[in-house]
Amino acid sequence: MPKTSIAQPSLVMIRTFSARLRVRGRSSIGRRSLAAEAGDTLLEVIISALLLGIIVVGVFSGLNSTNAATSLNRARSQADALAEQNEEQLHSLPISTLSKLEEKAVSKTVEQGGTKFEVISSATYYPASSTSSSCTSSSATEVGYIQTASTVTWHSLGKGKPVVETGIVSPPPDTSLIVEVTNELAEPVAGMEAQVTGPTSASALTSVSGCAILAVSPGEYAINVHRTGYVDQNWFPESKEDSFYEKTVYLPAETTTKKQYLFAPAAQLKPLTFKYLNPESGKEEEDKALNATLENPEMSPTTRLVEKEGNATYLATMQTAKIIYPFHKKSYTLYAGSCIANKPPVEEKEQTTVPFFPEKEQKATLVLPALIVDVWTGTEKSRGGLIKTAPEIFLSDTDEGCESTYHKQETIIPTNEKVGALKYPGQPWGTYTVCVNVPFENKTTKKIENKHFEQLGQKNSNPKKEGTVVNLYEGGPEGKELKAESCP
């Protein structure tokens, strides 16, 4: 049987790109040098090394990212544990201490595992009837709660969110006092010190919500609220000096009592200038006075006296110390004199309204009613000329309630304007007794007469006719001879 011839498979050769190039090179130019082949091999090695480097860098980058994430998670876990520990510590503190954290947070540094963490402790008071931060509960028994917060940050956190843990602390089940301080606009006043003294003593500063919480034992306590440079609505620097507020408070067991106060930085009246309207020229000119009154219905009592310290003297300007409560929404009414009877009618210009602002000086000018006293020879029915000698003129404010608070009764007003007359010195609105001493050649004096009149003020629309005129006669009433006597 003839043998079958089996074709042998062709030899398959796989050539690299560089090998094919070498073959082509041999066919075209013949044999290449060994140095050229070595250069091709070096190029292959460099490319392979670059590829391997890229792969290695990618692997290590992935490992670094994984390590960074692991490190951040570990730090965040440590921070969370620190925040929880800090919350436990805050909940063990007294209520009065926690209330101070609302005004100013406290920071501390804790190091763990080579990382420095900053732990910030803060607190916020929330009344029971509100979800906002305030101390405005309408009922004294609506105590609300304090929310504590522990915030932890560290350097490598960067702009990431810090770790925050919060908690709730209710007022103590025993006895507590809430002191709320606001100003005229019902805004909270921070930094006021609330003090109680009794079975136990405690003090706390009002927070940014105007609230201070004091935990004490049951019993009766003396209470005082104050802060340097601040006054209450009645111009007192401490609440214990003001009869408007209770000086003592009884705190029952297992209850919370709330007390409210009005305080603000004190203001000042500086200066107060006095003028009068010249009835002849119609111009305002400098005047002098003994005192003035500031009135506001929000005060108790409603008026305060502005006067010079020491002996009573007529002054062109006055001022107060920084003792005025800064009512500016409900301004003060200002007028010359010392009591409510000296207050002119609303339509008159002898009163003015003055707003005061916290820690500010406020200027003001008062125009007083013009008073003209003329002393004549003869009688009212047979009047001669003005007397030739300068009389002494005494005034006494006879309004009810003014004698004891206004200037000394029958105070002399010297006559400098013209012989025989006192020309338009301003006087507070009111009812007066006028008494005049006329000197004679024998150095005795005669009291002319007591003239009871009502100060009319600047009611005339013609300024040259404004003012109150008082005519007195040397001959006395109805021509009767006067006895030698003197005022007062």
Image: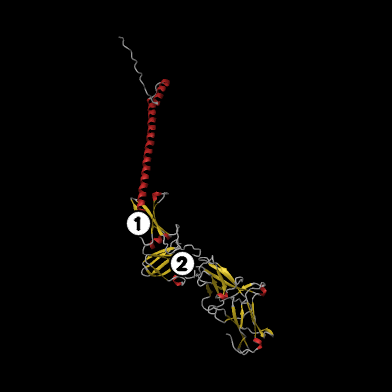
Q: How many marks?
A: 2
Task: Tell me the amino acid under the disc marked 2.
Answer: Tyr
Residue 385 sits in which quadrant?
A: bottom right
Return the disc, 2 or 1, that comes first in the chain's sequence.
Answer: 1
For residue 252, above or below residue 153: below
Residue 88: give its label.
1
What x and y, as percent, mark residue 283? 65, 72
Residue at (36, 42) in percent of width and height? 66
Its colouring scheme is secondary structure
User: How far across and how far down the image is residue 380, in percent?
Assistant: 67, 84
Residue 175 located left or right of residue 386? left
Q: Amino acid at mark 1?
A: Glu
Residue 261 drawn at (x, y percent): 46, 67
Residue 167 image offset from top left, x and y in percent: 38, 56
**Circle 2 residues within 10 Å: few <14, some 14–19, many ≥20:** some
Q: Quadrant of residue 276?
A: bottom right
Residue 280 visible in the snapshot: no
Q: Is residue 369 above or below residue 172?
A: below
Q: Which residue is mark 2?
A: 261
Judging depth in this view, the residue of 345 and 104 nearest the camera is 345
Q: Secondary structure at mark 2?
A: strand
Image height check: is 250 above or below 115? below
Taking the spot 39% from the left edge, 65% from the top edge, the residue there is 255
Residue furthest to the top in view is 1
State the residue in front, 151 or 284: 151
Cα–Cα span, label 2 and label 1: 34 Å
User: Which quadrant holds the N terminus?
Assistant: top left
Disc 1 packing (10 Å; few <14; some 14–19; many ≥20): few
The secondary structure type at the circle numbered 1 is: helix
